[in-house]
Image (tube, rainbow, N blue to C red):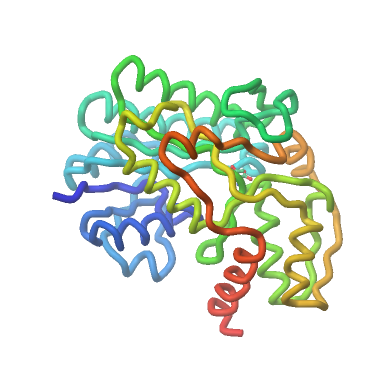
Amino acid sequence: MASKILIIGACGQIGTELTLALRDKVGKDNVIASDIREGNEELMSSGPFEIADATNYNQIGDLVIQYEIDEVYLMAAMLSATAEKLPMKAWDLNMGSLFHVLNLAKEGKIRKVFWPSSIAVFGPTTPKHDTPQTTVMEPTTVYGISKQAGERWCEYYHNKFGVDVRSIRYPGLISYKTLPGGGTTDYAVEIYHEALKTGKYTSFLKEDTELPMMFMDDAIRATISLMEAPSEKVKVRSSYNLSALNFTPATLANAIQKHIPEFEISYAPDFRQAIADSWPSSIDDSEARTDWGWRHEFDLEKMTSEMLEGIKEVYHV
Ligand code: AKB
């Protein structure tokens, strides 16, 4: 019998595509989407949906019982740029929701948990290039602090209570189905939309700010493949480094100009520059590659073609 899956935060950038991919894989009635608000038409028409607040233990617990849930993907989070503006709210959401789900697993009510971490767990004292899996971690953002604490709690619940929790340190994620919100890497999505809509874009990061990034299809494949890996292969129970591409705003603009030669980019760095400067520019993900066979498929060219085609369909241009 297929596992029953609950996705919390199903209407966000990752949640939307994860829900659709899992419904394709295990059947629409086996994947319950939930969020504090309704999502886009494609998501809402694709299977069961429940309004639920990730910070409310009873609401999440009731859904777990009602639908006899085996696995939870906890995708609700406040991202780096918004979290700097609302530090306590970010801490409550990012940590509170994680404790609810870890405790439900500890109580034996769910069998497996996926929780997203981020490259934001690293900080200015971390080696910037090919950042290793295990290294100095002194995050200087509210979001990074919450993700690093969350990683420690995941590992603790695994070691102490045997909770089967799995996690990935996502880089910046690029997608066209749902917009990201409140992140520092969001420029790399906005740029494609603006290139098609107006032919120009002002980047809030400097031209030479290199960050690790990934196309959403790769991120979804990685997430499902980590969750499907036999438990003994999942050796890291804090969170896995995961890597695909690294680029700067200038490199990305060049890739877009190959399709839209008249596209123009300018730069007006804001408070997000300091956040980006504290993060790695490339990640060593050899443990994910060895432990559960991770391979990325999308390079910058392939991703750029897919993004431009995908957005054209959305805008009907
Ligand atoms: C953000 O920019 O906050 C996120 C992330 C890297 O976790 N995209």
| Snapshot quadrant of residue 242 | top right
Residue 21 image offset from top left, x and y in percent:
37, 59
Q: Residue at x 57, y 59 (%)?
A: 298
| 254 relative position to 185: left or right | right
| 112 relative position to 178: left or right | left
| Snapshot quadrant of residue 194 | bottom right
Q: Quadrant of ligand 1?
A: top right
Q: Residue at x 56, y 37 (%)?
A: 285
Residue 116 image offset from top left, x and y in percent:
47, 39
Q: Which residue is at the far top?
A: 160
Say which of 23 and 66 sits in front: 23
Residue 134 image offset from top left, x and y in percent:
58, 23
| Snapshot quadrant of residue 141 | top right
Decide: is 29 above or below 143.
below
Q: Residue at x 75, y 77 (%)?
A: 260
| 62 relative position to 158: left or right | left
| Badge count | 0
Q: Which residue is at the far bottom?
A: 317
